[in-house]
Image (cartoon, rainbow, N blue to C red):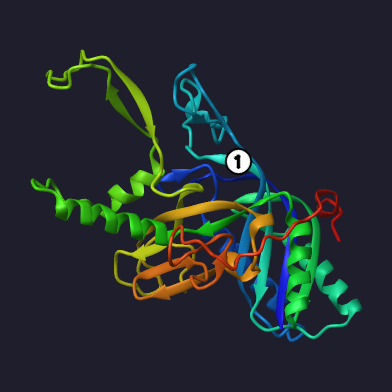
Amino acid sequence: MSQYLVLSHIDIQNANSIAGLTWGFPAITHFLGFTHALNRKISSAYQGDYDTTLAGCAVIAHNFQNKVYKPKKYADFEFLQSKNPPVLAIHKNSSPPIIEEGKMNLTLSLVIELDQSLVLNTELIKQLEEQVLTLCYQMRLAGGTILNIKQVKLLSASTQEQHVNMLRKIKRLTLPGFALLDRNSYLKAHYQKLVAQHNNEENPQEKPQLLDAWLDFAALKSKAIPQTKDLCNTLDENTPATWEYISKPFSGYLVPLMTGYKAISEVYAAAVVLNTRDQITPSCFVEAIHSIGEWKGMHSINDVRSIIWRYQQEGPWYLCKQDVDAEIGDAKTTEPNEPNETNETQTLNFNDALNFF
């Protein structure tokens, strides 16, 4: 039996908007960290009542607003900053320093997976949902304050028909929204393509790096098309040209994404590294890991398991991944842009989708 805890339409204020080299949406580690913290709170507050673990979660975004502005018409976006603390005696004759940080307000839903199904009657299910709602209001999500949660629902399914009905209920709880998917396979495929092109060149230049492949997804690129009748003429900076947008290597709403950490030092014993959070936990220095993600409408998701993020730790790597064998929409994550002939489109009535359970 499969079981999922749906936190529908969570309003968050002042969440972290910067994630490694990227900005605009919190890192996926924030949401898995929230899931882990919620699991610990449930275990601590209700010892023995619920014999299960919150194993992973899906992230569905509904609305977001980054706190940014443009100082000039064609300037880059800059984050709104506050001066903290605003008044100190040592700053009588000077402006207090700015602690640079990026904040945003957003509304999202979480679909949390339970690794072991709970056998509860209707009254106990309602009691669990109320307990989870109370605990969530005591927590922070992505560094922000939880202002409101529209609904908490525990959904279960055993048979194939029940799974179809459960997916329909999850969609109604999370529509309209976009699920965040792992597209690490796109990055790998594009990198292999760049290497193959490099090897086939007559006069190869410097071998492409994985960062070059990632930047093809993350950066906005354009190329100049010379506007000259005689292509034999020498082209220089004075040659008239039109600029053409270079599309991303694969189709879809693709975005750069921070998906975990890699250790860059040994694991130090407790209290060896100064100024750590506590003196009883070993510590290790890490760097952020970046990959590619895709926003995909919840109406096109055919299997809830395919959008669940889970931790995967191996050696120095601490990554957030999704099930690579699960089908997502019209493609498989193992083969980018591979058509799926057996894909069935499920039609939902939009008015029904707005009537949450």
Q: Is residue 330 left or right of residue 108?
A: left
* Image-based side of 200 in relation to 258, left or right: left
User: Label 1, on which residue?
Assistant: 104
Furthest residue toward left = 203
Q: Amino acid at mark 1?
A: Met
64 or 102, nearer to the observer: 64
In percent of width and height, residue 95 lies at 48, 24
Query: In the picture, which quadrant includes the N terminus?
Result: bottom right
Q: Residue at x 68, y 50 (%)?
A: 177
The answer to whether residue 275 is seen in the rendering is no
**Number of numbered discs visible in the structure rendering:** 1
263 or 93, which lies in front?
263
Outermost residue toward the right in this view = 123
Residue under the image location 21 percent in, 13 percent down: 238
Q: Is residue 125 placed above or below 81 in the rendered structure?
A: below
Q: Name the residue rendered at 66%, 64% in the picture.
A: 344
Could you say whether the residue bearing mark 1 is in a helix, strand or loop? strand
Crowd rating for badge 1 (residues with CA inside 10 Å; few <14, some 14–19, many 20+): many
Q: Nearer the viewer, residue 173 or 114?
A: 173
Picture quarter with the C terminus: bottom right
Along the line of sight, the residue nearer the viewer: 160 or 254 = 160
Residue 278 visible to the viewer:
yes
Left or right: 95 as drawn, with respect to 195: right
Quadrant of res 179: bottom right
The x and y percentages for residue 110 are 67, 60
Rendering coords of residue 171 (x, y %): 74, 59
Where is residue 80? Give x, y as percent: 55, 30
Residue 29 versus residue 234 in the image, above or below = below
* Residue 119 sits above or below residue 252 on the image: below
